[in-house]
Amino acid sequence: MDFFERQDHARRQTVRLVILFAISVAVIIAAVYVVALLIAQGGGSHAQGRSVATSMNLWDPGLLLAVAFSTIVVIAIGSLYKVSELAAGGEVVAQMMGGRLVDPQTTDLAERRLLNVVEEMSLASGVPVPQVFVLDNEPSINAFAAGYQPQSAVVAVSRGCLQYLTREELQGVLGHEFSHVLNGDMRLNLRLIGIVYGILVLSLIGYFVMRSAGFAGSSRNSDDRRGDNRATFFFIGLALYILGYLGVLLGNIIKAAISRQREFLADASSVQFTRNPSGLASALKKIGGLAEGSRINDPHAQEISHMFFSNAFAGSIFNLFATHPPLEERIRLLDPNFDGNYAGVEALPDAYVGLSSLTNQGAPAAHDAAVAAMASGLSSDAMPQLAGRPVSTDRDRIVSQVGTPQVEHLEHAERLVAGLPPMVVRAVREPYTARGIVFALLLSREDEATRNQQWQLLQAHAEPPLLQVVQQLSEQLDQLPAENRLPVVDMTIPALKRLSPAQYQAFRRIVEALTAADGKVDLFEYCLRVILFGYLDVQFGLRPAPSVRYKAVSAVSQPATIILSALAYAGQCQPNDIQQAFQAGTHDLLGQVQIVPPQECTFDTFDAALGELAQASPAVKRRILDAVVACIAADGKMTVEENELLRAVSAALACPLPPVPVR
Amino acid sequence: MPVLIILGLFFGIILILAIVVIGMYNKLVALRNRFKNAFSQIDVQLKRRYDLIPNLVECAKGYMKHERETLEAVIKARNAASSAGQKAAQNPGDPVAMAALSGAEGQLTGVLTRFMALSESYPDLKANQNMLSLQEELTSTENKVAFARQAYNDSVMYYNTQRETFPTVIIAGMFNFQAASLFEIEQAEQREAPKVSFG
């Protein structure tokens, strides 16, 4: 199962969820109807002293309609409200849980290690580095990922994770969370919360009505009619309260059933990612051995219970409600020899906290010998040699890697970070200097005149101290191998997310001015803009997150033609080669189509086309990416520029592509 | 049936009201968290600055033997600012804490400027590599403080505006959302300080 299938699978789960949910709403409506019937007719007949059963008319279409309508409206508004609240981003969820944003410049060893692991994992999987939160009030071992899409994802871990887990175990846990991000589970998770919340509103209203009827007008000598009405209101409230809670119960069963399956999938993806089952297994064993286990104390944990790494509540005999498969079952799948005995767990001494697995000698050797030799041979000064070499390509391999990072990507990312000058690594983590990184990357390396022009722009619009930073950084960054430039941009994203909206606007204007300084936008500049603005505009609310509108290739043939034409022009110079590359891309996707003339392939039309394609379904995106790779690889080689363009397209389509390793 | 219609209307109104109230409340909480997070960025840089200053003084001590008073004043101002910073970090946006911090920071900046101006007249000290790198580090940290301060003030302004506009102001009053204070360093001190030392 590849990335696109898993995404589709998650979407199908949503469909299944909606059906199950519709059934439970129907059950609730039926129950409310019966209650309403009892009150409307029973109450009236009671006054006339007749037997309720004989006079009851069970079929009252008007009443049913009224009940169904109001119930659906209540649940729908409640769900929409919660979903829209959570759609604001994972930050909201993490803060709701009492999470503290880990400062990217932290000097605390355990936090530093956590951030390093997260950074490497995101680079390896091609998603922007998420913001990281620590749940300081939770001494247990647990974690969750939240956010509607990779752009707004956050990762949160409990304090216990920092105290008890080694680097390998942390990798296992975070690999599990990253799989949730990559598998499209977060959207599903938020919908689950929204739906259950909608039913909960029903019960809250019932509670409110019951309370106000119970306490309002407590005077005993009020006339019978008002007393009667009050009793009626009280019973309606009570009934809604009970029914609502039954509905929540039902909703939780659905939630748990879907969640359990996704957990196995996430465990499997985590192992595929880190290729180190022992890390994840031993993290799970530590949960078993720890007195607090994976319990979460925060009262909001109930709402997001299915998003955690492991059960947030003490084991219950009702497996129906367990959001996660039993611990032992998960461990046995990873470690068949597990004897079921959990050893006691102690906090790690500070000295053990390994900051990087490359330097961590005590780490279990999960890497095979060849890879280890490669890692040790590749010191930072060996890296520039790889610059400018055409990157070999294998089109099936590239597309199958989308959203499916492998251990070599993780190692590639670790080496990449280790190979960066320390000054650059420090700079990407601070909002102030992260801007300098982006500006320095945009300074032209080929054309002196353009560079001067860009300097003038910076002098006019950026504050003087920053210019000095840019100067220093550009000396370092100009030596960076070309294929490492976009990953560095990826690394700046969490720091840039901490700008204030006004600061982001100013930053964005300078970036636009710098890219347009020489009157044209080159490929790298364009890709940088797509990646940076694609992620940050959503964060700062300048652009809504895309939703699926196109489910067939035919619906996006126009924008796809523009993209493929532009790619053909970008990659080739000879008319014949252009035609050939274009044909290679369009043949399987669209059949016979005419190439768009070059004057219509501007960055504006390209941008608009990407925006359209971003709204395609995963299956359509897969075919588009296939076509893009075919078009790029038509001449049998992929240059660094083409590689960057591929990254930009995949970022715009929200199909996280691991860095294509250079061999 | 009329009972049901009234009931329906009643539910509807309560529901809409509840959702609006919850929405506004959550928005305020999110904005408050945002400016508190923004303050933590300032806090990191301020702490780094407070850590650098004793090193700077230690380095200058050997050269500036006759400026004991100034050096002590720097350390004193640094300690005052550091404790004001700790208080402010516990409760970012609190008017009293923020006023204390900006006062203490203004003091510290003034004293530091005087110290720097004085150190100009000690050529040996000026040429000291350690001193140079410390100064450089201090300046870059101050730039970062200024930038983080701007981000913090932006988010405070946004929160305050949201808090004061109708109808959010009702919710803010009900749930006791306090107005947050900007973090401004008294500019007058900064500008005057060099004049004093040269005069």
Image (spheres, rainbow, N blue to C red):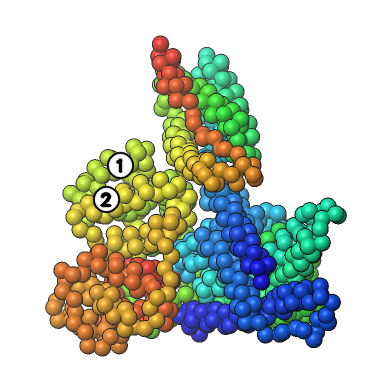
Give the quadrant of residue A172: bottom right
| Residue A598 percent location from the top left of the image | 16, 71
Give the quadrant of residue B44: top right
Q: Is residue A606 left or right of residue A362?
A: left
Comparing A576 with A409, the one in front is A576
SS label for mark 1: helix
Tag 2 residue:
A513
- Residue, x 40% and y 11% (percent of image)? B199
Number of marks drawn: 2
- Residue, x 33% and y 59% (percent of image)? A529
Whether pointer 1 and pointer 2 mark residues with C-beta atoms closer than 8 Å, the reply is: yes
Q: Are marks 1 and 2 on the same chain?
A: yes
Q: Is residue A561 left or right of residue A169?
A: left
Q: Residues within 10 Å of mark 2 (few under 14, many from 20)?
A: some
Looking at the image, tell me whether mark 1 or mark 2 is earlier in sequence order: 1
| Residue B170 percent location from the top left of the image | 59, 44
| Residue B56 percent location from the top left of the image | 52, 29
